[in-house]
């Protein structure tokens, strides 16, 4: 199964076909009826949801244990200019690897007592939502480590704790893509 590892500045995420996660994450899929693919990323709540990241917010996130969020972007199609970008890497996964990665992503969402997702903010102008996560963000538990942990669950040979930068995650994804 093909997924994409994505990079936006210092931040990484995982882009997956919506049809492949419909059964395992129906609540998320229902929030994006017009999407063909969903891009999942995780990060510090205040920094990630701020209109603009600041040095103060970055230091706060790095030095203090903080709340985190899942950010989901929906894409209605994958144009060639997007998939051929150096900031997007296609990786083939086994079905078992895909399912393990998807379970990890699903477990990253905080849920209310009735199992509903905790939606913090929806972008009315596009397909984008922030959801509360139950994982604490701090120090060496960054968005890139989260992405690396998901890729490790998917079967990639890497050590997530050493994947602190987006470049490190992308290099590992590119190496995996070349092994195919």
Image (cartoon, helix red, strand yellow):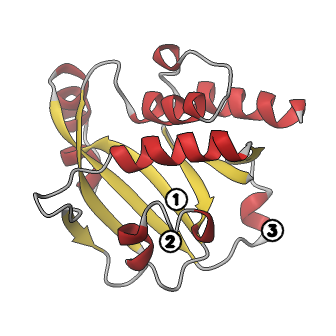
Which residue occupies 69% across, 26% down?
Answer: 172
The quadrant holding residue 176 is top right
- Residue 115, visible in the rendered structure: yes
| Residue wearing tag 2 | 74
Mark 1 → mark 3, Cα distance in angstroms: 16 Å
Task: Please identify, in this view, whether the residue under mark 1 or under mark 3 is nearer the observer.
Answer: 1
Residue 132 in the image, given as x and y percentages of width and height: 21, 53
Number of numbered discs overlaid on the protein picture: 3
Q: Which mark is residue 39?
A: 1
Image side of residue 3 versus residue 14, left or right: right
* Label 2 environment density (alpha carbons within 10 Å; few <14, some 14–19, many ≥20): many
In the structure shown, which secondary structural element does the residue marked by tag 2 occupy? Answer: strand
Residue 47 in the image, given as x and y percentages of width and height: 25, 44
Which residue occupies 61% across, 24% down?
Answer: 168
Asked whether the residues under the numbered discs 1 and 2 touch, taking CB atoms below 8 Å apart as contact, a structural biologist would say yes
User: Quick check: 62 above or below 69?
Assistant: above
- Residue 8, visible in the rendered structure: no
The residue positioned farthest toward the left in the image shown: 113
Task: Please identify, in this view, whether the residue under mark 3 or under mark 2 is nearer the observer.
Answer: 2
Mark 3 → mark 2, Cα distance in angstroms: 17 Å
Q: Which mark is residue 80?
A: 3
Image side of residue 64 versus residue 157, left or right: left
Image side of residue 104 versus residue 156, left or right: left
User: Quick check: 122 above or below 66?
Assistant: below
Q: Which mark is residue 130?
A: none
* Label 1 environment density (alpha carbons within 10 Å; few <14, some 14–19, many ≥20): many
Q: State which tag comes first along the sequence, 1 or 3.
A: 1
Mark 1 → mark 2, Cα distance in angstroms: 6 Å
């Amino acid at each position: 199964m093909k997924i994409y590892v994505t990079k936006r500045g210092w931040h990484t995420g995982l882009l997956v076909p919506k049809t492949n996660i419909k059964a395992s994450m129906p609540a998320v899929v229902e929030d994006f009826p017009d999407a063909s693919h969903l891009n999942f990323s995780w990060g510090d709540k205040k920094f990630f949801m701020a209109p603009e990241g600041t040095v103060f917010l970055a230091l706060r996130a790095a030095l203090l244990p903080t709340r985190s969020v899942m950010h989901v972007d929906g894409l209605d199609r994958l144009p060639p200019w997007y998939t051929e970008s150096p900031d997007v890497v296609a990786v083939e996964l086994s079905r078992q690897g895909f399912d393990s990665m998807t379970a990890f992503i699903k477990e990253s969402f905080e849920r209310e007592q009735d199992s509903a997702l905790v939606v913090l903010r929806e972008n009315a102008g596009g397909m984008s939502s922030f959801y509360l996560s139950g994982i604490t963000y701090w120090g060496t538990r960054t968005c890139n480590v989260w992405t690396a942990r998901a890729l490790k669950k998917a079967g990639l040979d890497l050590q997530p704790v050493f994947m602190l930068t987006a470049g490190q995650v992308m290099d590992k994804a590119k190496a995996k893509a070349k092994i195919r």
